[in-house]
Amino acid sequence: MATTIAVLSQKGGTGKTTTVRTLTDIFRRIGLEVLAVDLDPQGNLSDYFDVPPDADPTVADVLAGKSKAADAIHDGVLPANLGLAESELVLSGKMGREMTLRRALRDVKRRYDVILIDCPPALGLLTVNAVVAADYALISAEAQYFAMQGVEQALEVIELAKENLHPDLEWLGVFLNIADMRTVHSRDALTQLKERFGERVFKAAIRSSIRYAESAERGVSIVDYRPELGADYLGLAEEILRDIGMGDESGRVAALRDELVPA
Ligand SMILES: Nc1ncnc2c1ncn2[C@@H]1O[C@H](COP(=O)(O)OP(=O)(O)O)[C@@H](O)[C@H]1O
Ligand SMILES: [Mg+2]
């Protein structure tokens, strides 16, 4: 049965989609079967994985009850497009609206080791569906002013989901993303996160670099494009796998890092 992780943040531009894409690449590299779920109507994750824009059905059809999840998976991706915005509206009027994705993924969980869900840039019904469908919620925090506020808000959604809908949901933690450690903002953000959340802050922080935009444009994973930067994500992947009880797989990521980024 797949372990499901939702990657969320209070807003857009915090590196969520890049995180889901890169973790998917890394997990697949060590031999895991990974399903990447795009829950953002902008469809950035689907684009990254080269799902054709006219792919049909999509996650919108799954949430609308028009299609089974299994039929909407294209090469390991459950894609999204702008139609998902409409689905969210339709969904909001339905009973059990927060549980829809969870129910839909039940049938496909057996086929995968890990399911990663990329959330939209708002803490609305789609993000609630993502965390309710997940075993673990992972918060991406941008290294900026007000980072703490965003993390607190995302955490509130996780707590509400846990109390009212999904008691087994676990908060995996928060990591600093798009961080420029030369700036006082980034350093302050990390200090504040550590003071507030202690052990829940991942040791790996994802450094900011123009190479991410380039690698996205070229459709190459950062792990291959600039392994020395990809090392940040390899570190994050290692910590995540360890924390969710996949110690052997975590070790395989460590070995991959030694291979890609010789000391
Ligand atoms: N570590 C990074 N350093 C610099 N730019 C990044 C980094 N990660 C992502 N980006 C860029 O920042 C933008 C937003 O990233 P994205 O992953 O789409 O965030 P979100 O999904 O939270 O909106 C994209 O243009 C992406 O290429
Ligand atoms: Mg995104």
Image (cartoon, rainbow, N blue to C red):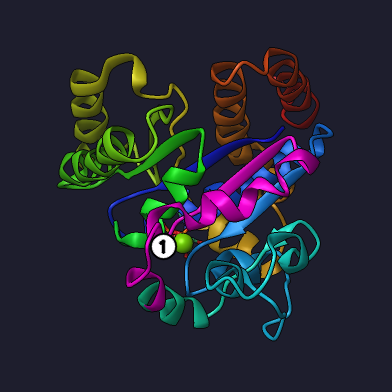
Magenta stretch: give its range: 90-119
Measured along the vertical axis of the image, is residue 127 above or below residue 44?
A: above
Which sits in the foreground, 48 or 167?
A: 167
Query: Could you tell me which secondary element the residue under label 1 belongs to?
Result: loop
Residue at 39% x, 36% y: name it: 166
Please count the marks in the image: 1
**Looking at numbered disc 1 in the image, what kind of residue is underneath it?**
Pro
Q: Residue at x 37, y 62 (%)?
A: 95
Farthest front residue in view:
95
> Going by the picture, which residue comes out furthest to the right?
31
Placement of 1 over or under 97, stated as above or below = above
How many neighbours does mark 1 have within 10 angstroms: few (below 14), some (14-19), or many (20 or more)? many
Along the viewing direction, whichever of 157 and 204 lies nearer the viewer: 157
Relative image position of residue 79 (x, y in whole percent): 64, 68
Q: Position of residue 200 (x, y in %)?
A: 35, 21
Q: Is mark 1 within 8 Å of ligand 2?
A: yes
User: What residue is shown at x 72% (from left), y 32% (from top)?
Assistant: 1
Q: Which residue is mark 1?
A: 120
Magenta stretch holds residue 107: yes
Q: Is residue 35 above or below residue 88?
A: above
**Residue 108: x percent and y percent?**
73, 49
Which residue sits at x=69%, y=35%? Answer: 2
The reply, left or right, for residue 144 in relation to residue 4 is left
Work out which quarter of the rendered image holds the C terminus and state it: top right
46 sits to left or right of 173: right
Quick check: can you spot residue 110? yes
Magenta highlight on residue 130 = no
Occupied quadrant, residue 239:
top right
Q: Nearer the viewer, residue 32 or 99?
A: 99
**Quick one: 249 or 64, which is closer to the camera?**
64
